[in-house]
């Protein structure tokens, strides 16, 4: 399986949230949807954290530049 982009993970997560909010998921699907949502949340959070780290690194380099 290929790694999801942030945007793909976010879109899928939004779809899961919408489905859970509408209440159209069966009882059997709730646990699976919740687990997938948690997984997608972790993907999004990790990608955002990585970008934040790169931005901070770039800022640090810029501050040290003459």
Image: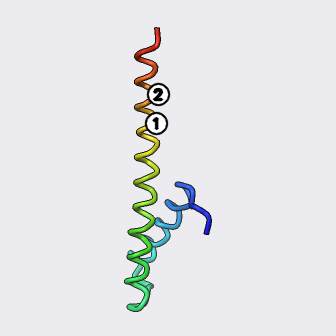
Q: Residue furthest right?
A: 2
The answer to whether the residue labelled 2 contacts the one labelled 1, judged by CB atoms less than 8 Å apart, is yes
Q: Residues within 10 Å of mark 1 (few under 14, many from 20)?
A: few
Seen in the picture, residue 41 relative to 35 is either above or below; the reply is: above
| Figure coloring | rainbow
**Spatial CA span between label 2 and label 1:** 6 Å
- What kind of element bears circle 1? helix
- Image quadrant occupied by the N terminus: bottom right
Q: Residues within 10 Å of mark 2 (few under 14, many from 20)?
A: few
Name the one closer to the observer, 40 or 65.
65
Seen in the picture, residue 64 relative to 4 is either above or below; the reply is: above
Residue at x-position 43% and y-position 48%: 48
Residue 16 point in image, percent of width and height: 46, 72
Residue at x-position 40% and y-position 24%: 60
Determine which residue is flagged by label 1: 54
Residue 34 point in image, percent of width and height: 38, 76
Determine which residue is flagged by label 2: 58
- What kind of element bears circle 2? helix
Residue 58 point in image, percent of width and height: 46, 27
Seen in the picture, residue 25 relative to 38 is either above or below; the reply is: below
Residue at x-position 46% and y-position 13%: 65
Residue 23 point in image, percent of width and height: 40, 82
């Amino acid at each position: 399986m290929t790694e999801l982009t942030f945007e793909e993970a976010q879109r899928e997560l939004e779809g899961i949230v919408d489905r859970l909010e509408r209440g159209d998921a069966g009882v059997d699907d709730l646990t699976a949807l919740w687990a997938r949502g948690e997984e997608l949340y972790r993907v999004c959070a990790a990608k955002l954290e990585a970008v934040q780290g790169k931005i901070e690194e770039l800022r640090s380099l810029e501050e040290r530049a003459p």
